[in-house]
Amino acid sequence: EIPPVYEQVLARYTDAMAEYWDMVICMDSDVNYMLSQHEGDPFVDIGYTITDLDGDGVDELLIATTSTTEASNYQHLVYDLFTIKDDACVRVFGSVETNLLFYLGGDKFANVGFNDWNDALDDILQFQNASLTKVGEGADPADYVQLPLTPFKVRY
């Protein structure tokens, strides 16, 4: 069952993909603008899952690429991670080209990218208490895990 606070998010993402929203419309509508840059069929290549990552009884919503994504640098990519806090949907992380999130399994993620020309990101993050905390460095892309996703082509 989908928590009601996530239904609106899923509806916005579905509309963004169905109507091929551009970057500006995505940002104005609180949808990850990287969806506007997706090559391929987003209804096949992008999906969602709702799961309790840290065992606290609150389900998180992850929007990510499916196993059919052909762009190797986007395989296992988490576009957005949401949680529920005070009965509201809260974005914990949103990937951008320079700061990407990849799933490592359980409650762990790889955060890869850069802040500026000499500040590379290659961190291992743990989801706990509605936030991501650095717990290590240097995740190997071979350790990225495919989330079990429902493709958006399957209407919720």
Image (spheres, helix red, strand yellow):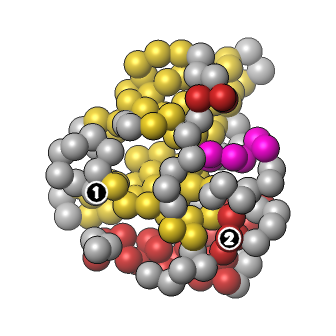
Q: Quadrant of the N terminus?
A: bottom left
Residue sitting at x 73%, y 56%: 69
**Residue nearest the observer in this picture, 41 or 19:** 41
Residue sitting at x 76%, y 72%: 41
Q: Position of residue 102 (x, y in %)?
A: 57, 39
**Crowdedness of circle 1 by 10 Å Cα count: few (<14), some, many (20+)?**
some
Of the numbered discs 1 and 2, the one sitting upstream in the chain is 2
In what element is the residue under mark 1? Answer: loop
State whether residue 49 is above or below residue 131: below
Q: Position of residue 77 (x, y in %)?
A: 62, 47
Q: Quadrant of the C terminus?
A: bottom left
What's under tag 2, amino acid-wise?
Answer: Val
In what element is the residue under mark 2? Answer: helix
Residue 49, quarter of picture = bottom left
What's under tag 1, amino acid-wise?
Answer: Asp
**Residue nearest the observer in this picture, 54 or 117:** 54
For residue 23, say whether it is visible: no
State whether residue 127 is above or below residue 12: above
Q: Which residues are magenta?
A: 72-77
**Residue nearest the observer in this picture, 79 or 24:** 79
Q: Which dot marks residue 144?
A: none
Q: Which dot marks residue 44?
A: 2
Q: Which dot marks residue 59?
A: 1
Q: Position of residue 149 (x, y in %)?
A: 51, 61
113 with respect to 101 (left or right): right
Circle 1 or circle 2, nearest the eye: 2
Q: CA distance from mark 1 to mark 2?
A: 23 Å
Whether the residues at callouts 1 and 2 have beta carbons within 8 Å, the answer is no
Residue sitting at x 34%, y 55%: 51
Residue sitting at x 68%, y 70%: 44
